[in-house]
Amino acid sequence: MGRRGYTAEFRQRVLDLVAAGRRVEDIARDLGISDQTVYAGAGKTESTADLRAA
């Protein structure tokens, strides 16, 4: 299976949801993506430990 591409707007939406305090698991489920996709995208701006603590 090939890599799935996401628009800049979609990635920003994910980051906004993380910044708003939403749980990674909830974001992933609601958007139909994996937890790891959320961690990978948000990990560029925050540490993974910070995301897991949220």
Image: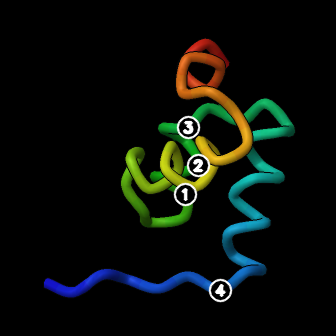
Cα distance in 3D space between marks 3 and 4: 19 Å
Q: Residue furthest left?
A: 1
**Label 2 amino acid?**
Ile
Label for residue 24?
A: 3
Crowd rating for badge 1 (residues with CA inside 10 Å; few <14, some 14–19, many 20+)? few
- For image coordinates 83% across by 52% down, the residue present is 16
**Label 1 amino acid?**
Asp
Cα distance in 3D space between marks 4 and 1: 17 Å
Residue that mark 2 sits on: 27
Against 15, residue 7 (above or below) is below
Label for residue 30?
A: 1
- Residue 50 image-quadrant placement: top right
Q: Tell me whether the residue at label 4 lies in contact with that at label 1, contact meaning CB atoms closer than 8 angstroms.
A: no
**Label 4 amino acid?**
Thr
Residue that mark 4 sits on: 7
Q: Tell me whether the residue at label 2 lies in contact with that at label 1, contact meaning CB atoms closer than 8 angstroms.
A: yes
Of badges 3 and 4, the one in the foreground is 4
Q: Tell me whether the residue at label 2 lies in contact with that at label 3, contact meaning CB atoms closer than 8 angstroms.
A: yes
